[in-house]
Image: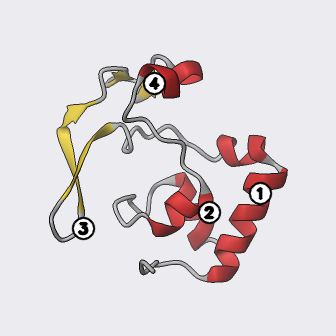
Amino acid sequence: MAQSRFRMRAFADALDMYIRHNDQWEALCDMCGRCCFERELTDSGEVVINYAAPCEFLDLQTRSCTVYDCRFERCQACRKLSPATVFLANHLPDECAYVRAFLDT
Protein backbone atom coordinates (compact mmCIF):
# COMPACT_ATOMS: atom_id res chain seq x y z
CA MET A 1 0.00 0.00 0.00
CA ALA A 2 1.21 3.51 -0.80
CA GLN A 3 2.56 5.71 1.96
CA SER A 4 0.56 8.75 2.99
CA ARG A 5 1.52 11.88 4.85
CA PHE A 6 -1.83 11.86 6.68
CA ARG A 7 -3.24 10.05 9.69
CA MET A 8 -6.00 7.46 9.28
CA ARG A 9 -8.31 9.48 11.57
CA ALA A 10 -8.09 12.40 9.15
CA PHE A 11 -8.95 10.05 6.29
CA ALA A 12 -11.99 8.69 8.15
CA ASP A 13 -13.26 12.22 8.83
CA ALA A 14 -12.79 13.29 5.21
CA LEU A 15 -14.42 10.12 3.92
CA ASP A 16 -17.43 10.74 6.17
CA MET A 17 -17.75 14.28 4.79
CA TYR A 18 -17.44 12.98 1.22
CA ILE A 19 -20.12 10.31 1.69
CA ARG A 20 -22.63 12.19 3.83
CA HIS A 21 -22.00 15.79 2.85
CA ASN A 22 -20.64 15.75 -0.70
CA ASP A 23 -21.56 19.41 -1.20
CA GLN A 24 -19.26 20.34 1.70
CA TRP A 25 -16.45 18.25 0.21
CA GLU A 26 -16.85 19.98 -3.15
CA ALA A 27 -16.95 23.37 -1.41
CA LEU A 28 -13.48 22.76 0.03
CA CYS A 29 -11.90 23.51 -3.34
CA ASP A 30 -10.45 27.02 -3.30
CA MET A 31 -9.90 26.86 -7.07
CA CYS A 32 -6.17 27.44 -6.94
CA GLY A 33 -5.84 25.65 -10.28
CA ARG A 34 -2.79 23.63 -9.23
CA CYS A 35 -4.43 20.35 -10.20
CA CYS A 36 -5.23 21.73 -13.68
CA PHE A 37 -1.83 21.18 -15.25
CA GLU A 38 -0.49 18.22 -17.19
CA ARG A 39 0.96 15.49 -15.02
CA GLU A 40 3.32 12.64 -15.82
CA LEU A 41 4.12 9.52 -13.87
CA THR A 42 7.83 8.72 -13.80
CA ASP A 43 9.24 5.20 -13.87
CA SER A 44 9.75 5.45 -10.11
CA GLY A 45 6.07 6.28 -9.56
CA GLU A 46 6.57 9.97 -8.82
CA VAL A 47 4.05 12.44 -10.24
CA VAL A 48 5.64 15.39 -12.02
CA ILE A 49 3.47 18.43 -12.72
CA ASN A 50 4.25 20.48 -15.82
CA TYR A 51 3.26 24.02 -14.84
CA ALA A 52 4.08 25.17 -18.38
CA ALA A 53 1.18 23.08 -19.72
CA PRO A 54 -2.16 24.15 -18.23
CA CYS A 55 -5.43 22.48 -19.11
CA GLU A 56 -7.02 24.11 -22.13
CA PHE A 57 -10.04 24.99 -19.96
CA LEU A 58 -8.08 26.73 -17.20
CA ASP A 59 -8.38 30.51 -17.24
CA LEU A 60 -4.87 31.48 -16.18
CA GLN A 61 -5.88 34.92 -14.94
CA THR A 62 -8.69 33.80 -12.65
CA ARG A 63 -7.33 30.27 -12.03
CA SER A 64 -10.83 28.96 -12.62
CA CYS A 65 -12.13 26.26 -14.92
CA THR A 66 -14.15 27.63 -17.82
CA VAL A 67 -16.17 24.39 -18.04
CA TYR A 68 -16.36 23.56 -14.33
CA ASP A 69 -19.90 22.14 -14.32
CA CYS A 70 -19.10 19.66 -17.10
CA ARG A 71 -15.32 19.35 -16.62
CA PHE A 72 -15.30 15.56 -16.33
CA GLU A 73 -17.09 15.19 -19.65
CA ARG A 74 -15.05 17.85 -21.48
CA CYS A 75 -11.57 17.00 -20.20
CA GLN A 76 -10.40 13.39 -20.09
CA ALA A 77 -7.51 14.25 -17.76
CA CYS A 78 -9.77 15.86 -15.16
CA ARG A 79 -10.39 13.64 -12.15
CA LYS A 80 -12.63 14.17 -9.17
CA LEU A 81 -10.59 14.44 -6.00
CA SER A 82 -12.01 11.97 -3.53
CA PRO A 83 -10.62 11.49 -0.02
CA ALA A 84 -8.81 8.35 -1.22
CA THR A 85 -7.25 10.23 -4.13
CA VAL A 86 -6.05 13.05 -1.89
CA PHE A 87 -4.92 10.64 0.84
CA LEU A 88 -2.68 8.74 -1.55
CA ALA A 89 -1.59 11.62 -3.81
CA ASN A 90 1.84 12.97 -3.03
CA HIS A 91 1.79 15.53 -5.83
CA LEU A 92 -0.83 17.82 -4.29
CA PRO A 93 0.79 20.72 -2.43
CA ASP A 94 0.11 21.40 1.26
CA GLU A 95 -1.67 24.60 0.15
CA CYS A 96 -4.39 22.58 -1.61
CA ALA A 97 -7.66 22.96 0.33
CA TYR A 98 -8.30 19.22 0.17
CA VAL A 99 -4.86 18.50 1.60
CA ARG A 100 -5.40 21.12 4.31
CA ALA A 101 -8.61 19.30 5.30
CA PHE A 102 -6.43 16.32 6.21
CA LEU A 103 -3.66 18.32 7.82
CA ASP A 104 -6.02 20.42 9.97
CA THR A 105 -7.76 17.43 11.58
Q: Where residue 39 sits: x, y (%)?
A: 25, 46
Up-down relation of residue 87 to residue 33 (above or below) = below
Whole-Å distance between the Cαs marked 4 and 1?
24 Å
Q: Earlier in the sequence, mark 4 or mark 2?
A: 4
User: In the image, residue 22 lies at what x, y percent?
Assistant: 76, 45
What distance separates the C-alpha of mark 2 from that of mark 3? 25 Å
Determine which residue is flagged by label 1.
17
Examine the rendering and report whether any part of residue 99 can be seen. Answer: no
Q: Is residue 104 above or below residue 7?
A: above
Query: Label 4 sits on what residue type?
Result: Cys
Q: How many other residues sit within 10 Å of disc 2, few (<14), some (14-19) or many (≥20)? A: some
In the drawing, what numbered circle is on residue 45?
Answer: 3
Q: Earlier in the sequence, mark 3 or mark 4?
A: 3
Q: Nearer the viewer, mark 1 or mark 2?
A: 1
**Residue type (three-letter) at the residue carrying disc 2:** Ala
Mark 3 vs mark 1, CA separation in Å: 29 Å
Q: Are marks 3 and 1 in contact (CB under 8 Å)?
A: no
Q: Circle 3 — which element?
A: loop
Q: CA distance from mark 4 to mark 2?
A: 22 Å
- The residue closer to the viewer here, 46 or 28, is 46
Question: Does residue 3 sit above or below 88 in this rendering?
Answer: below
Give the distance between the C-alpha atoms of the residues marked 3 and 4, in whole angstroms.
28 Å
Report whether 99 appears left or right of 56: right
**What is the three-letter code of the residue carrying label 3?**
Gly
Residue tagged 2: 101
Rendered image quadrant of residue 89:
bottom left
Task: Give the image location of residue 50, x and y in percent.
Answer: 18, 44
Q: Are marks 1 and 2 in contact (CB under 8 Å)?
A: yes
